[in-house]
């Protein structure tokens, strides 16, 4: 996975999107069947619960060339497994602090609660995140990870 | 038995504190067993064998090299490559060679910042002419050279092919003796690339402190902020302990001494990033559900990257701070 075009106008960021099976993934289905247009920037990975998203997945995504990572889960109180999204929120909050220490821009990592009926919200979130990342430009994380400077 | 040739053993330090070499000495009287079976052919902390003596050895001459320390300078890299060539088995010995260790924390910074701090802005330095270390300096007697200080700290396996990893800061001496005796007695060696001298369980499995399923942590404390009751899980008391994400092997030495585990034994088999697993574990232990409660708890984790990657930054997925 490599972003090759550096021209911010024509360049589409690559966002790895981890969506939970019960809410956000279904919302993306709804956005699809509702024919809502949104930026073709996400590569969606369906997970059973946002609580399944290990910080390792996020790091691995960045290390392999993602320009951003979006996590979508059920609204608080709505988790299919009752508490998975709270675990996700805690991990995410800790990850944000870690990412800041590692020099990763805040806008590259985002968590949103999107229920199965919120296809519209999904459209808005993806578009908004794509705009923010477009302003930041392509991620250099992969290059830094792979290039040891002597 | 008398004719059995002795094993040729070498110990070398890269970017290290010397503790790993001392841990080899900590075999105490077992040292007699070691020297009965092995000749120490190169060990800068204890023997006056020069680099050129190693260079003159035939390739594969050394049976086992314990390489401790990270790779941070051109000298470390040269010696890592040289010892790789001269050794049949190269073991990354200790946390620094395994995943970067304490010197690896320099990957939060870079060469320029480090030099500026050490040779310019440090409170104890007086350097008006801004003299910085140079790899070559002309003096009237001739040219003086120093190894190049690299921008990034590397683990041993980022520089050369490594046969085994023996983690720990320093590795528990009993584990070293076990490994050594396995080689001496001709036991079948584990597959190449294995982490040896460790257990297949995490620290918590060996820890005797009382643990409950419901951790319910609302805030973390620095060790000096609370009085440890001496028997409850340190994490449950809000003292960050790396036990849940750290491989056993040391015998839970730190926690037995009432100090939290700092994670020097590295991650479990198949886990590429110990810090990620620790973050994952922390999230399961926290109590709060509201953003402000969670923020408050996370805020009390003062330095997550430095704490969770204390011994493993160069070997972690993201390897270093972005520039």
Image: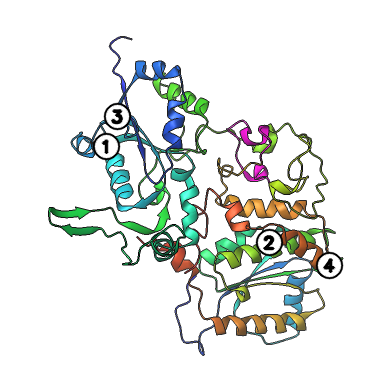
Viewer-side label of 1, 3: 3
Viewer-side label of 4, 2: 2
Residue at horizontal 83 percent and vertical 63 percent from the top: A79
Quadrant for the N terminus of chain B in the image: top left
The answer to which image quadrant residue A70 occupies is: bottom right
- The subunit letter for the residue under badge 4 reads A
Residue at horizontal 45 percent and vertical 18 percent from the top: B30
As helix, strand or loop, the secondary structure at mark 2 comes to helix
Which residue is label 2 attached to? Answer: A94
Distance in Å between CA atoms under marks 1 and 4: 60 Å
Viewer-side label of 2, 1: 2
Tell me which numbered mark, 1 or 3, is placed earlier along the sequence.
Answer: 3
Marks 3/4 in contact by CB < 8 Å: the verdict is: no
Which residue is label 3 attached to? Answer: B47
Outermost residue toward the bottom in this view: A9
Residue interval drawn in magenta:
B240-259
Q: Is label 2 on the same chain as label 1?
A: no
Distance in Å between CA atoms under marks 2 and 1: 45 Å
């Amino acid at each position: 996975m490599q972003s090759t075009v550096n021209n911010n106008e024509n360049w589409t960021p690559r966002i790895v999107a981890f969506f939970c099976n019960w809410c956000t993934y279904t919302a993306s289905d709804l956005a699809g069947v509702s024919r809502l247009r949104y930026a073709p920037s996400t590569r969606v990975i369906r997970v059973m619960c946002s609580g399944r998203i290990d910080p390792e997945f996020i790091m691995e995504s960045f290390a392999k060339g993602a320009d951003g990572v979006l996590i979508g889960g059920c609204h608080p109180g709505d988790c299919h497994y009752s508490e998975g999204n709270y675990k996700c929120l805690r991990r995410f909050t800790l990850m944000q602090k870690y990412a800041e220490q590692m020099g990763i821009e805040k806008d590259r990592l985002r968590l949103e609660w999107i229920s199965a009926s919120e296809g519209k919200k999904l459209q808005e979130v993806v578009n908004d995140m794509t705009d923010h990342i477009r302003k930041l430009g392509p991620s250099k994380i992969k290059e830094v990870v792979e290039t040891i400077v002597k | 038995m008398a004719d059995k040739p002795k094993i040729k053993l070498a110990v070398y330090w890269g970017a290290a504190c010397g503790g790993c070499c001392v841990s080899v000495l900590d075999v105490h009287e077992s040292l007699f067993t070691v020297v009965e079976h092995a000749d120490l052919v190169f060990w800068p902390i204890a023997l006056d064998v020069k680099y050129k003596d190693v260079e003159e050895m035939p390739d594969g001459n050394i049976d086992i090299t314990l390489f401790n320390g990270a790779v941070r300078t051109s000298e470390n890299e040269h010696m890592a490559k040289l010892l790789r060539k001269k050794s049949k088995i190269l073991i990354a010995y200790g946390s620094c060679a395994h995943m970067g260790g304490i010197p690896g924390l320099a990957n939060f910074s870079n060469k320029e910042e480090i030099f500026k701090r050490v040779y310019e802005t440090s409170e104890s330095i007086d350097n008006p002419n801004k003299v910085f270390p140079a790899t070559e300096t002309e003096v009237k007697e001739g040219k003086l050279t120093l190894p190049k200080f690299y921008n990034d700290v590397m683990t041993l396996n980022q520089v050369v092919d490594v046969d085994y990893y023996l983690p720990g800061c320093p590795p528990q001496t009993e584990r070293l003796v076990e490994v050594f005796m396995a080689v001496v007695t001709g036991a079948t060696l584990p597959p190449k690339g294995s982490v040896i001298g460790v257990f297949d369980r995490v620290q918590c499995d060996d820890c005797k402190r009382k643990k409950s399923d419901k951790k319910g942590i609302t805030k973390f404390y620095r060790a000096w902020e609370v009085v440890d009751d001496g028997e409850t899980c340190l994490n449950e008391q809000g003292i960050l302990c790396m036990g849940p994400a750290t491989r056993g092997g040391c015998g839970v030495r730190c926690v037995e001494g009432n100090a939290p585990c700092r994670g020097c034994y590295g991650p479990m088999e198949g886990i590429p990033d110990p810090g990620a697993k620790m973050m994952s574990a922390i999230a399961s232990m926290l109590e709060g559900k509201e953003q402000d409660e969670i923020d408050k708890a996370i805020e009390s984790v003062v330095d997550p990257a430095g704490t969770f990657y204390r011994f493993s930054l160069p070997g972690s997925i993201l390897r270093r701070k972005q520039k």
